[in-house]
Amino acid sequence: MRAVELCLTMRSSLREVTQAAVDGARRNGASWAAIGEILGSSRQAAQQMYGSAGVDAAPSAVDAAPAVRTLYPVTAFDEMGKLAKLGAEGWHAIRVGLQSHELVQDTRPWEHVRVLQGSRKSTRLPIEGWTEVPGGTFPWVYFTRPVPGPRDSTRR
């Protein structure tokens, strides 16, 4: 019975990861036909299964909300370098997905860090002013914060 429970948990997790990947692909302009082809289904089936309200291929130019972008695809080998570059330009992660980071733009520079879940550092960072970024994939957890000023006590 434990094996059945584990399979059910894995299926649920896989669904969430696939949803995040599809959302990221849509934000980056992928068509439902292309997504359906990768999933081995029709455009309509992919859209019915993974379509989310509010996830469009192109953001509205009239929207007054802050600029949002999806950094995709990234790997464990290149994501931190890309986040450092974009962080210096005022972008910071608000959600981590499978091979992707959802970013929002700010007027301040930001820094990002990736650590092992459950590590001492992962418990210390929030005390030092870091905010945990939702999402992520085992074994990583991500944190972000505005770059501290010269007189800030949380400066490294």
Image: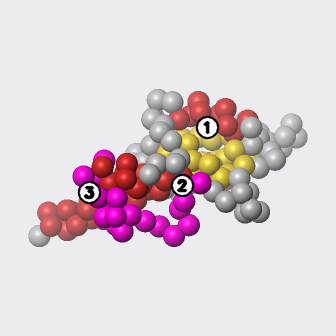
Say whether disc 1 or disc 2 marks the residue closer to the N-terminus.
2
Asked whether residue 1 is in view, the answer is: yes
User: Is residue 11 placed above or below 27 in the rendered structure?
Assistant: below
Quadrant of the snapshot with the C terminus? top right
Q: Position of residue 119 (x, y in %)?
A: 48, 46
Give the residue furthest to the left: 1
Q: Quadrant of residue 5?
A: bottom left
Q: Secondary structure at mark 2?
A: loop
Which one is nearer the viewer's eye here, 65 or 115?
65
Q: Looking at the image, is mark 1 or mark 2 nearer the viewer?
A: 2
Q: Which residues are magenta?
A: 38-58
Q: Residues within 10 Å of mark 2 (few under 14, many from 20)?
A: some
Identity, as a three-letter code, of the amino acid under mark 1: Leu
Identity, as a three-letter code, of the amino acid under mark 3: Ser
Residue 147 belongs to magenta span? no
Identity, as a three-letter code, of the amino acid under mark 2: Ala
Mark 1 lies on residue: 83
The reply to whether callout 3 and callout 2 are in contact (CB within 8 Å) is no
User: Is residue 150 placed above or below 6 in the rendered structure?
Assistant: above
User: Is residue 155 placed above or below 22 in the rendered structure?
Assistant: above
Q: Position of residue 102 (x, y in %)?
A: 57, 51
Alpha-carbon span between mark 3 and mark 1: 34 Å
Which numbered circle lies on residue 57? 2
Mark 3 lies on residue: 41
Q: Position of residue 96 (x, y in %)?
A: 51, 51
Instruction: Name the residue: 65% across, 34% down.
Output: 84
Alpha-carbon span between mark 1 and mark 2: 22 Å
Say whether disc 3 or disc 2 marks the residue closer to the N-terminus.
3
